[in-house]
Image (spheres, helix red, strand yellow):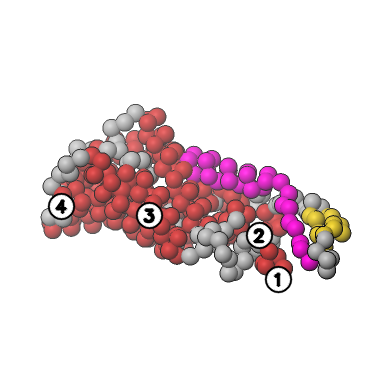
Amino acid sequence: MRSVIAICPHGSTFAVGTRRRPRFSLGTLVGRKSVHAPPRTARTRQMSSDSPDPSGASLSYRRILEREMENALREIHRPVGGVFLSAFAAGLNLSFGALFMAMALTFSGGFESTFVQQLVLGGVSSVAFLFVVVGQTELFTAHSTMAVLPVLDGRASLSELGRVWAVTYVGNLLGCGAFSVLAVTLGPAMNVAEPSSFGTLAGALVPFPWWVILLSGVVAGWLMGLVTWLAAASRDTVGRVLFVLLVTAAIGFGPFHHSILGTTEVLTAVLLGAGVGVGGLGHFLLWTTLGNVVGGTVFVGILNYGHVTLGGEEHDVEVE
């Protein structure tokens, strides 16, 4: 219900009318035939927290969902070749995180405490996530959150969702594979990443029961979903950078199982013969991927979509 309040010259106020606002729907945000939101009126921009020159630090939850929906629809309708190349680049770029962690382990000569070690590893790995998120290349664990939104809203089909997931996933893994070959060739030759360092990284991910890897993957997917949501909430690059660094550092600090970054860690250890076999890689990849999908889709995509669309009516007051 929207109330209009008038103020008379003597300072008294009285209600002059009410009208019911339509229930929120993403169709009114994004449009049924376009991926862009409909134009906003000058008065709406003035009264909304989503105005071009806001005083707040982040967008409203409705505007965040609008942004995520627009991005998801754009990627779903993007040519497959473009999505694949972007995903391949993301796999390459994120793999720097594995190299940076291996370099930290190699150069440190051994940390005095596990806490310091994990703090450093989380910090250096978050830089690689920054390359991907701010660089806007296609990461599977981001799409597990974002691409499901148009399906929930009836704007895309399950087959379209499956296509963008498959192309992104394969592109990411191929990028990881290419980077692993580079790391195997360059790291030991320059003495910047010893084989044992990759064995240490893989050893923190592989030797667990399937349900432990699955649940850890849920946490990592959940955190990555939060990264995409918070990055969309940020109004500027500085805020986006801070969100990415802080949240993704928690993945490396755990370490929680991330299907793309972890693939480079484990695959490089396999190629170097650092105590992990192909079976361990498959065990890691299967349960981690499932966990990442559940974490991003359920705990961020579905829950955030639900609380926005079921948020009820807005109440605005106009003072004249």
209 over 178 or under it: above or below: above
N-term mark: 2 or 1:
2
Q: Which residues are magenta?
A: 294-320
285 over 166 or under it: above or below: above
Residue occupying the far front of the picture: 10
Q: CA distance from mark 3 to mark 4?
A: 22 Å
At label 4, the amino acid type is Phe
- Side (left or right) of 167 relative to 48: left
- Rendered image: mark on residue 42: 1
Q: Nearer the viewer, mark 2 or mark 3?
A: 3
Q: Nearer the viewer, mark 3 or mark 4?
A: 3
> Is 120 or 264 nearer to us in this picture?
120
N-term mark: 4 or 2:
2
Helix, strand or loop at disc 3?
helix
Q: CA distance from mark 4 to mark 2?
A: 50 Å
Q: CA distance from mark 2 to mark 3?
A: 30 Å
**Residue at which label 3 appears:** 245
At label 2, the amino acid type is Val
What residue do we see at 53% from left, 45% from top? 300
